[in-house]
Image (cartoon, helix red, strand yellow):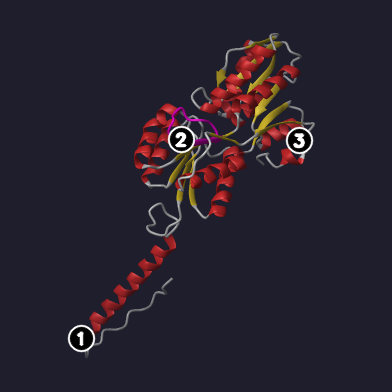
Amino acid sequence: MTRATTPPRPDRRRGRPARAATVLAAALSLLAAAALSGCSDAGTTAEGGEGRKPYIAIVSKGFQQQFWQAVKKGAEREAEKRGVTISFEGPATETEVEAQVNMVSNSLGRKPDALGLAALDSRAVEPMLKQAERRGTPVIAFDSGVDSDIPLTTAATDNRAAAAEAAEHMAEEVGGKGKVALVVHSQTSGSGVDRRDGFVEWMEKNAPGVELLPVQYGGGDQTKSADITKAIIASNPDVKGIYGSNEGSAMGVIQGVKESGRDDISTVGFDSGQGQINAIEEGRMAGAITQNPVRIGEQVVAAAVKAVKGEKLPETIDTGYYWYDKSNIDDPRIQEVLYR
């Protein structure tokens, strides 16, 4: 950084030449500062020019939940490993479709080398995907699939299979009979659809004694999901189990059951934020599915780098999942994928 100096007094004996020298010195100083500023930005902006690092823009479904922070951590780790620059953003909640569309549009405006996207609404982002395709910008989907053939691959949990496992454990909890409710985070995103359908399909096929109540949608918001849960219990006092399909939904279910004063309702969830971990350890939740969000973030960046290089990618990248409950929560394999 150039240290500020006091300009020299005018040289009255030499007049104009002295003033010209002063102006020239100031101009050279400004040019030097601009050059230094340009060097510091090179490789860290989307339009850094020749020699810059590849830039990958990543837009998630949300930002505040521990799950998304873990995805971000994995993406940053992989970016450092591969020598690329990333940006990572998402709306405050998983209901803000318009906000996410604007983020995708702004990200493309920065001319990234690749785009990572976990879409809240496939139809809403379709124009942005087509724009990326026209520009030749590869798109990597993550967390849930995008209903489009534009993304080159999807890095995600097998949500349908994971939800089926959650259903199997719920059936065990309720003894294979009785009413079971679902509080799902989305009916437009791929993960919401798969975590709903995987649960429902397994129950219908394997637990004929279980009566599934109409699916309710809480947008992944804890407070709204808690209110929905309390309404379900008030309308169906004989409900035996409630499933929450993501971190916010699961925490809302736990909260709603508690506020209803019911400790006889089994709850099963998805994801593994600290609140869910506490609930399982305290016996307030039977168990849940944990994804591997750090690995999801890593795979988004790894796939984007390969796409930029023109390498072929598989249609899907399965990032894995585990069922965890009080009996196995201390297993090292589980501990390393919890979202604390």
Disc marking residue 15? 1
Residue 145 lies within the magenta run: yes
Which-is-in-front pick, marks 3 and 2?
A: 2
Q: Residues under labels 3 and 2: Cα distance?
A: 35 Å
Range shown magenta: 142-155
Residue type at the position of mark 1: Gly
Where, by quadrant of the figure, is residue 182 drawn? Answer: top right
Q: From this viewpoint, is residue 261 visible?
A: no
Please name the residue that numbered disc 3 is placed on: 329
Q: From this viewpoint, is residue 116 visible?
A: yes
Please name the residue that numbered disc 2 is placed on: 151
Q: Residue furthest front?
A: 312
Secondary structure category for the residue under label 2: loop
**Image quadrant in which the C terminus is located:** top right
Q: Is residue 65 above or below residue 73?
A: above
* Figure label count: 3
Secondary structure category for the residue under label 1: loop
Q: Which sits earlier in the primary sequence, circle 3 or circle 1? A: 1
Residue type at the position of mark 3: Ile
Question: Do the residues bearing badges 3 and 1 touch, measured as CB atoms within 8 Å?
Answer: no
Q: Residue furthest right?
A: 327
Q: Residue at x 41, y 47 (%)?
A: 112
Q: Residues under labels 3 and 1: Cα distance?
A: 82 Å
Disc marking residue 119? none
Q: Position of residue 27 (x, y in %)?
A: 29, 73
